[in-house]
Image: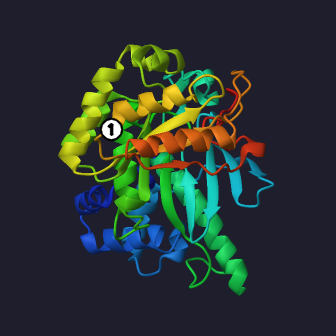
Amino acid sequence: MKPAPVNFHDLTREALRLQVVRWGFSPVHAARLWAYVYLEGLERWADMPELPVRFRAKAEGELAFPRLPVATETHSADGFTRKYLLALADDRRIETVLMRYTGRVTACISSQAGCAMGCVFCATGQMGFARHLAAGEIVAQALHVDRVLRQASCNLVGYKGPGPTSRGERLRNIVLMGMGEPLHNYDAVMTATEILCDSAGLSLGTKQVTLSTVGVVPGILRLADEGRPIHLAVSLHGATQAERAALVPVAKKWPLDELMDACRYYIAKQQRRIFYEWTLIEGKNDSADNAHAVGRLLQGQNAQVNLIPLNPTAGYGGAPTGQDAARRFQQILREYRLPSTIRQRRGIDIAAGCGQLATLPP
């Protein structure tokens, strides 16, 4: 039986070049194929006339361009957010979010179906873990958002053919903050990041990619040692071991002291800032004492704190901190020379906010 075609989106540009050379063809054809797919948004061999017929015949039997079908598309009343429930080949589901901001479009993409980390206020964590996503399944989410934007651009100028246009929005940022723990699926996530940031493809640039982790210490250390220049965001949520472990069970495996050592190592090795995420839960971790504890914990680090008022989920009964209390928390952080932002709430009405992504198993 002939093996199934390889998912094109699993391949880095170098892996594709090597494959094409193994077939006995020029690497020039690999470069042109890569540009057709990632620069021009094409997926049909008939739309790639510059590739020789003999090469296309070989590649068509060896490579596939599988899309993730849209099971459900939901638009937020805020007018800036769309959520896509995407179907995987094994009939599991993942969620991807398109978010518009002034001057940029961001895709929030998933790295796993479900999550093994079990954060108590997170809908994905409440689901449990199903499986890792392959690199191509991660890339396909970004490509889906890119296609949506390309189509909107084409409609804007009345263009009906394939490929990019000169007007309209393009995908600018990727946040690996969707379903799953990216550092739990390290190799696939890094391969996907390499593909998405390739200068000959979507060319997002590592400055446009942010990876959010709940604190997987070995992954943070590996990220530092490998010199991966993407932005790192660490979900903190508690400034003592006991408080953090109550919200983030994985803190029992990687205690707060060990996590802080890893973060300081990352900052020193990479010479770059870490973003700490703090979900503000009314009456739980939003007091002045909590803010001072965060300040003492992070003082002196090259760090920024992203304050995120809790988003509601069915499995957790906490309430979000109000704006006045959030600003007081932020003011205390300034006393420790810690910059901070209060996360702009987007897509809450369609459960597209941080911690809200979830699907029912098939």
Instruction: Answer with left or right where residue 320 lies relative to residue 45.
Output: right
Instruction: Say which residue appears at 70% left-offset and 21% top-offset.
Output: 315
Q: In which quarter of the image is the N terminus?
A: top left
Q: Can residue 1 be seen in this view?
A: no
Q: Where does residue 139 sit, x and y in percent of width and height?
A: 47, 52
Q: In this view, does 37 lie above or below 182?
A: below
Q: Where does residue 112 sit, x and y in percent of width and height?
A: 51, 35
Dot 1: within a 10 Å radius of its alpha carbon, few (fewer than 14), some, or many (20 or more) residues?
A: some
Q: Where does residue 180 sit, x and y in percent of width and height?
A: 51, 33
Query: Looking at the image, which is closer to me, 45 or 282?
Result: 282
Residue that sits furthest to the right in the current view: 77
What coloring was used for the rendering? Answer: rainbow
Q: Is mark 1 on a helix, strand or loop?
A: loop
Instruction: Say which residue appears at 72% left-offset and 40% top-offset.
Output: 351
Query: Looking at the image, which is closer to me, 239 or 252?
Result: 239
- Give amino acid for label 1: Gln
Q: In this view, does 128 lie above or below 24?
A: above
Q: In this view, does 109 lie above or below 112?
A: below
Instruction: Say which residue appears at 18% left-offset and 45% top-offset.
Output: 269
- Which residue is tagged 1? 299
